[in-house]
Image (spheres, helix red, strand yellow):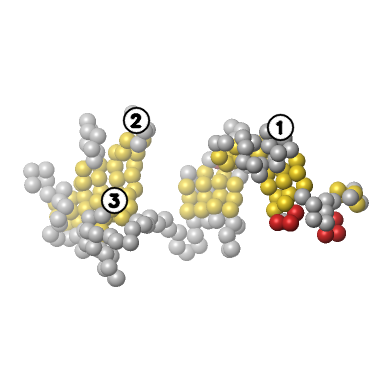
Amino acid sequence: TQDAGNVVFNEAGANYDFRIESVDEDEAIFLDASANTLYINKGETSFDVKISSDNDEALRVDATGVVLNEDGHATNDFRVESDSNTHMLFIDSGNDKVGIGTSAPLADLDVAHATDPRIRMTRADATVVADEVLGSLQFASNDPSAGAVGASMQAKASSAWSSNNYGAYIRFLTTPDNSGDQAERMRIDEDGNVGIGESSPSGKVHITDGDG
């Protein structure tokens, strides 16, 4: 029906499906009235969906996946809200930055919180034993090949974990010139002792030169 300039389907409780076909997709747009569900590309064929704004193409769904800002010059920001944060996840497209908890990220990745901003790595393992890696922070480049790592910070378990027993130590590694292998340079052990050139520090600061 047409009412006051509007086109209405299924007015007054009618229960008719609505379907729009394309050349290769019988249900390019499909309203399943009884299920209260609107489908786009219900048949899952090779069918592209594009949504644009005044900043060019904002969203595309095609065979390659879901893409925001497919046009190289599109600057549509992307935002995900949580219960209490309007910018729980925010992509500042115009400035090429990502914010978590902030609407104005100042770095490639900016994590913000009013009292306790934090980044956490969790080893998804129900059993942790001594010397297993808990997490690493790596400093890398794609020169001369992808994934070349020059330095790292790595946390490891110092013993098997159990209730209220989460011993751990941190290793600092760098790569010498003319080498592709990292070597441990410094360690903070589970007791807070620091070893430089020493993996088993016997005091608060234990330094060992290259000759032992």
Q: Position of residue 178 (x, y in %)?
A: 22, 30
Disc 3 marks a residue whose amino acid type is Gln
Percent coordinates x, y for residue 7 in the rendering: 86, 48
- Please give the label number shown on residue 154: 3
3 or 1: tag closer to the N-terminus: 1
Q: Which residue is mark 1?
A: 23
The three-letter amino acid code for the residue at tag 2 is Ser
Residue 186 versus residue 141 in the image, above or below: below
Q: How many marks?
A: 3
For image coordinates 59% across by 32% down, the residue present is 72
C-alpha distance separating marks 3 and 2: 22 Å
Residue 40 vs residue 33, the one in the foreground = 33
**Label for residue 94?**
none
Residue 69 visible in the snapshot: no
In this view, 24 is above or below 43: above
Observer-side mark, 3 or 1, equals 1
- Nearer to us: label 1 or label 2: 1
Q: In the structure shown, which secondary structural element does the residue marked by tag 2 occupy?
A: loop
